[in-house]
Image (cartoon, rainbow, N blue to C red):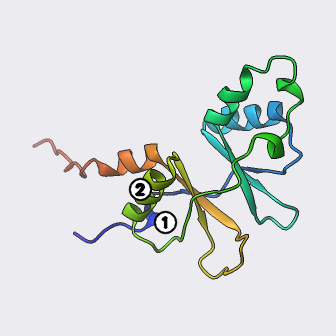
Amino acid sequence: MPAKAVAEVMHPGVVTCRPTTSILEIVRLMNQHDISAVVVVDDHDRLAGIVTRNEMVAFYGYEEMWPHLQADQIMITQVATALPDEPAFRAAQEMRRRRMQHVVVVEANDATRRPRPVGVVSATDLVRDMEPARPQLTEE
């Protein structure tokens, strides 16, 4: 069985915010979309960073400043990325190498340092994909 491509396991479309987006708005986006990461993009929709629930929890302890924080103050800028046509196991390797739970999938034809995001693969997505397809049971 050939390895699945990243595009086959990723969440298509990306929930994004700008670097100046408030942490409270990021919380709202995560809850509204039932996701654990929001991709931060610049004014040209190019990848600038990622805010995950881990960063949210880490900064939650700063009670007085927490509601005033913005994405650019808590985001990870060294983002793990993958191309849509790469094997999904490469995304898993990148997660392990960088100790991250998310890989941002970027446009394949974008060779710039700041590519445009097209999807996200989470560790949860990869685990879901590991389960072999179950045959459909039919009643006779």
Q: In this rendering, would 18 be left or right of 9?
A: right
Q: Amino acid at mark 1?
A: Ala
Which of the two residues, 74 or 18, is positioned nearer the viewer here? Answer: 74
Q: Position of residue 54 (x, y in %)?
A: 61, 34
Structural distance between the alpha carbons of marks 2 and 1: 13 Å
| Place of residue 66 in the rendered image (x, y in percent of width and height, measured from the top left) | 82, 25
Q: Residue furthest left?
A: 140
The residue lying at 67 percent from left, 28 percent from top is 58
- Rendered-image quadrant of the N terminus: bottom left
The residue at the point 68 percent across, 36 percent down is 30
Q: Quadrant of residue 75?
A: top right
Amino acid bearing label 2:
Ala
Characterize the local packing of mark 1: few (<14), some (14-19) or many (20 or more) Cα atoms within 10 angstroms. many
Q: Which residue is under mark 2? A: 92
Choose top left, top right, bottom left or bottom right for residue 80: bottom right
- State which tag comes first along the sequence, 2 or 1: 1
Between residue 73 and residue 1, name the one nearer to us.
73
Indicate whether 54 appears above or below 101. Answer: above
**Left or right position of 27 against 139:** right
Q: Total of numbered circles in the picture?
A: 2
Label drawn at residue 138: none
Residue 42's place in the image compared with 2, above or below, is above
| Picture layout, residue 128 above or below residue 121 | above
How crowded is the residue under tag 2: few (<14 C-alpha within 10 Å), some, or many (20+)?
many
**Residue 76 coordinates in the image, percent (x, y):** 69, 48
Q: Which residue is mark 1?
A: 7
Q: Quadrant of the C terminus?
A: top left
Image point 66% across, 27% down: which residue? 57
Residue 107 in the image: x percent, y percent? Answer: 63, 73
Which residue is painted at 67% across and 31% down in the image?
A: 31
